[in-house]
Image (spheres, rainbow, N blue to C red):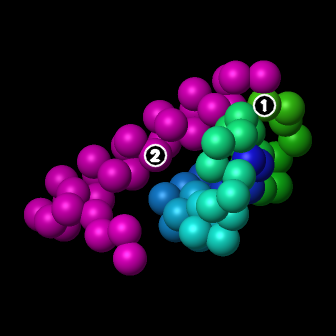
Amino acid sequence: MLLEVRRNHVIKDALGTIRYSQDDLSSKLQIKFIGEAGVDLGGLRREFFSILVYQFSHSALTSGKAYHLD
């Protein structure tokens, strides 16, 4: 599965792609940051998950409530 995401909207972009591509959930995850050149050999995946965790935790800490997936 190829996820094309914007750095500032990782959660929204990833969830949108996953909702429409559920058949691909068992395939190898590849990440592409929109507007950036780069081949995902593992580093982009690690960076994606770091940003994802940061955005989830930052949203919960600053708003006082958990991030809603809908």
Tell me the distance, in whole angstroms, between the alpha carbons under discs 2 and 1.
Answer: 16 Å
Q: Which residue is mark 2?
A: 52
**Left or right placement of residue 28 versus residue 35 in this view:** left
Most prominent secondary structure in the magenta stretch? helix
Crowding at dot 2, Cα within 10 Å, few <14 / some 14-19 / many 20+, comes out as some
Dot 2 lies on which element?
helix
**Left or right placement of residue 61 versus residue 11 in this view:** left
Dot 1 lies on which element?
loop
Q: Which residues are magenta?
A: 41-70
Q: Amino acid at mark 1?
A: Asp
Q: Residue at x 28, y 64 (%)?
A: 67
- Quadrant location of the C terminus in the rendered image: bottom left
Residue 27's place in the image compared with 65, above or below, is above
Q: Residue at x 39, y 51 (%)?
A: 55
3 and 8: which is toward the camera: 3
Q: Which residue is mark 1?
A: 40
Q: Which mark is residue 16?
A: none
Q: Is residue 8 magenta?
A: no
Q: Amino acid at mark 2?
A: Leu
Q: Residue at x 70, y 23 (%)?
A: 42
Residue 41's quadrant in the figure?
top right
**Left or right placement of residue 58 versus residue 20 in this view:** left
Residue 35: x, y in percent?
Answer: 82, 55
Q: Is residue 56 magenta?
A: yes
51 and 4: which is toward the camera: 4
Residue 53's place in the image compared with 60, above or below, is above
Crowding at dot 1, Cα within 10 Å, few <14 / some 14-19 / many 20+, comes out as some
